[in-house]
Each structure stands twice: as structure tokens, then as C-alpha cells.
Image (cartoon, rainbow, N blue to C red):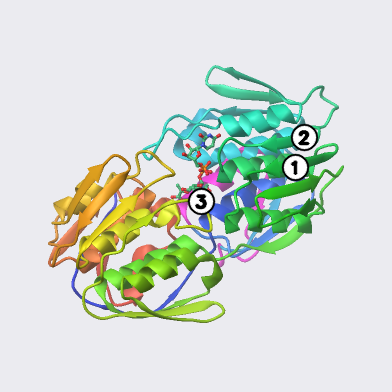
Amino acid sequence: MDKLRMVGGSPLQGEVIIAGAKNAALPILCACLLTDQTITLRNVPDLQDVRTMLKLLQEIGVEVRFPDAADRSYVALNAGNIKSSEATYEMVKTMRASILVLGPLLARMHSAKVSLPGGCAIGARPVDQHIKGLKAMGATIKIEGGYIQAETPSPQNRLKGASILTDMITVTGTENLLMAASLANGTTILENAAREPEVGDLAELLVKMGAKITGIGTDRLVIEGVDKLHGAEHSVIPDRIEAGTFLCAVAAAGGEILVKHCRPGTLDAVIVKLQEAGLKMEVGSDWIKASMSGRPKAVSFRTSEYPAFPTDMQAQLMAVNAIASGNATITETIFENRFMHVQELNRLGADIAIEGNTAIAQGVEALSGAIVMATDLRASASLVIAGLAAQGETQVDRIYHLDRGYDRMEQKLTLLGANIVRVK
Ligand code: EPU
């Protein structure tokens, strides 16, 4: 199992180029299932979850091509000859986002069999709202042998438009229902829809494919179903979480970096908090220049749905708080178990206590390197940030979590002058 070994204490200096957003790319790849024509994508990040999704799509029968062998971010997908409507337990257990094939397969093939995802390190993460929405659109859904078995009312029949109000805001739930509704018969109204930019990016691709969607970017999506969708070209939006992770890295380790190819408008809540922490930022149309000297100031925050502070940045900003001057309270409202990095940060010398869904961080002057273990994707990023700020050597084990969601993170950090290596 790969590990990352780093010696902290040197400030970051230079430029970093942000890749396409993982959480936009995953549903966007699944959207290819909605048409028999080719979908050509650019700015697809080269990371493990994307490779897993491409493998799943290939198992279903999608033809995946890289038109330029030297550029993995440019992918062409054709689902003209689908041979299966199934996502196996083997696939879903490695990546929960596999659930995103359910809506499109059901809409286009009139049946789908997708393994029910189990619990997850960060929370229970049920998919009841996905199922409830598809049932409202006329699907018959049974859970059998650990699989969600979904069918439209009859093999010839399409899903039908419906008014759906989800019990809570769900990102992949909104995406699944949005894709299904695009090919349904009639109009679907999705109330309480997730407003995350990744949902908007998927909707933009669907519109290019011929879908009729209004309300993009709002919590009320209206989808007038069409008979057929067609091929399209699309460039995935930049990853706001990757950009935010590098901003936290410079806030913790100090230095001056230029974050390029990002979309600052999707990072407002993160920028506000990092400014409060003392990070100096100059913001352009697709770049952020950030510099930090001295110790950050502690900043309290609570996670919430977009446009509020993202849960996917909680662990990284906690790492900044670990070495900040002052106390911060960090409240996690989206996932009930997303504090596993706390014990590992404490192994690096942080002073963080957990009370229910709130972590109380008492900033310390300095962290000291140690061997720590990554427990999930964003927890891994927070340990890397802490390791870059710590004195001495830190080793982060189980780095496969990081590889699921970051495109060449240690290479990008090396270019910023960090002393970091991957150990096989
Ligand atoms: N929920 C339910 N029932 C459902 C769906 C969700 O109870 O049917 C609950 C969840 O358990 C959670 C809350 O609703 O407490 C929100 O979950 P959501 O469905 O929005 O999460 P998700 O769609 O499974 C996506 C991202 C996550 C990100 C969350 C929240 C993808 C592929 N994943 O997950 O990304 O944390 O939204 O923004 O888009 C990551 O990248 O590290 C990551 C975990």
C-alpha cells in the first residue's frame, strides 16, 4: 500500500493547476448512458474514482476512448451497445457513486440492477431518496439479494414526470433524478434540489444533449422529459474542493501560491473563512493568488449545503485550525461520522476534542511529525496539510483514499516546493 512521506516546515511557493471536479465528472460520465450517440468530455480528472467509473461503464457495455493517448482528461464515451443494466456489488462497494448509473439506466433501458451501497466510513449514507424519487416517477423497485432492482411500469413504458420533494438535500440523489427525468414522459419538478455547482455542471451537459431543464443552480429544477437525447461535447468544471485544499495547504504551511484554472465563484464560503484565518488573497476570473505569513487565526465554521461551507472542506480547514492561534468550533451537519481525522491530527500534536457533531480545536504553536493513517478521502488531505505544516517527518498511510479524489496531489505539491514523496 502506498504511503506519502513528507518533511514539513517549508513554505509553499509557485503555481498549481486545478483539475476537473471529481464530483461533477462522476455523474457526467454516467450521463453517457442516456444516449446512443457519443459524449466527448474534456477536463476529466485522472483519479481513481474516475477510473473505477469508466470500468463500471465498460462492464455495462459503454465504449470508452481516449482520442489523444497522451491526454487522459479527454474522453469519448459511446453507450450505443449497452449489454447489461447492472452495477455489481464489487463495483459499488469500491465506489458509492456507482449508484449514479441507476437513474440513467432505468430511464433508457427501462430496467436496472444496482447493488445497494452499504454504510460508509463518514456516515450511513442511505439512498432512500433516490429510490423514493424514482418510485414517484412510476418505477417498481424491489430490494433483493442486496440489489436495487428497478423497472419502469412496463418494458416499453418510460418513466413518467412527477413532482418530487426530497426529505433532505442530496447531491447524487438530485443528479440521479435529474438524469432519469430528462428521458421521462412528461414534466418532473425536483423541489429541495441540491444547488452544488457539480449538479449545475451535469445539468449543463444534459441541456447540450437536448434535455429541457430550467432552474439550473436553484433548488427547484423543472425537467420536461424528451423522447431521445443526443451526443454532445462538454468540459468538466474545475474542482472547487481541490482548489480549496491547496488554499488550506498554504494557509497552514505559509508561502505564496497561484491557484490556476479554478472557479473562484464556487469557493465563496471557503474564501471568506480563509480570509478570516489571515490568508491574503487576490481573486481573478479563473485564478486565486494566496499568501500567508505567520500563524493562521482560528476560525469557527459549520458545514452545510452549497453555497454554505462544504463538508468536503471540513477536514482541511480543521488542519489549519490545528496550528492556529485561538480556539475554533467546527460543526459537521452533513455526515454523522466525518471526524475520523481528529484522532490522527491529535497524533501530530493537535489539541482537538469532539462533542457530538462539533469539534473544538485549541490551536497549538506547532505540530510534530508522526506516522498517521488516512481514513477517507478528505481526511487524507487534511493529514497531508498538517504534515506540511508540522516539524519533522510525517508519513500518511493508506493513501489510496487520497488517490480516489486527487489528481497527482504529491506531484503538484512537489512543484510548489514541498518535500513530499510517495513510498510504494
Ligand atoms: N441522505 C439520505 N438519503 C438519501 C441521500 C442522502 O439520508 O437518499 C443523507 C446522507 O446520508 C447525508 C446527506 O443526506 O447525511 C447528504 O448526502 P448527499 O446525498 O448529498 O451526499 P452524496 O450525494 O452521497 C456527494 C458527494 C460527497 C459530498 C456530499 C455532500 C459525490 C460523488 N459525492 O455525496 O463527496 O460530501 O455530496 O456534499 O458527489 C467527497 O468528494 O469526498 C465526497 C464524500
Mark 2: few/some/many CA within 10 Å (<14, 14-19, 20+):
many
Q: Quadrant of the C terminus?
A: bottom left
Please report whichever mark, 2 or 1, sits nearer to the chain's N-terminal start. Answer: 2
> Which residue was labeled with disc 1?
189
Please report whichever mark, 3 or 1, sits nearer to the chain's N-terminal start. Answer: 1
Mark 3: few/some/many CA within 10 Å (<14, 14-19, 20+):
some
What is the secondary structure assignment of the residue under circle 1? Answer: strand
> Which residue was labeled with disc 2?
162
The three-letter amino acid code for the residue at tag 3 is: Glu
- Residue 53 on the magenta span: yes
x and y percent of residue 73 in the render?
57, 63
Q: Nearer the viewer, residue 392 or 159?
A: 159
Taking the image as shown, residue 105 lies to the left or right of residue 397, namely: right
Residue at image coords 27%, 73%:
418
Taking the image as shown, residue 7 lies to the left or right of residue 198, namely: left
Please report whichever mark, 2 or 3, sits nearer to the chain's N-terminal start. Answer: 2
- Tell me if label 3 and label 1 are in contact, CB under 8 Å: no
CB of mark 3 near ligand 1 (< 8 Å): yes
Q: Nearer the viewer, residue 173 or 280?
A: 280
- Residue 188 on the magenta span: no
x and y percent of residue 331 in the render?
35, 49
Q: Is residue 397 visible?
A: no
> Which residue was labeled with disc 3?
305
Q: Is residue 18 visible?
A: yes
x and y percent of residue 11 in the render?
25, 78
Magenta segment: 47-72
- Tell me if label 2 and label 1 are in contact, CB under 8 Å: yes
The three-letter amino acid code for the residue at tag 1 is: Ile
Q: CA distance from mark 2 to mark 3?
A: 24 Å
CB of mark 1 near ligand 1 (< 8 Å): no
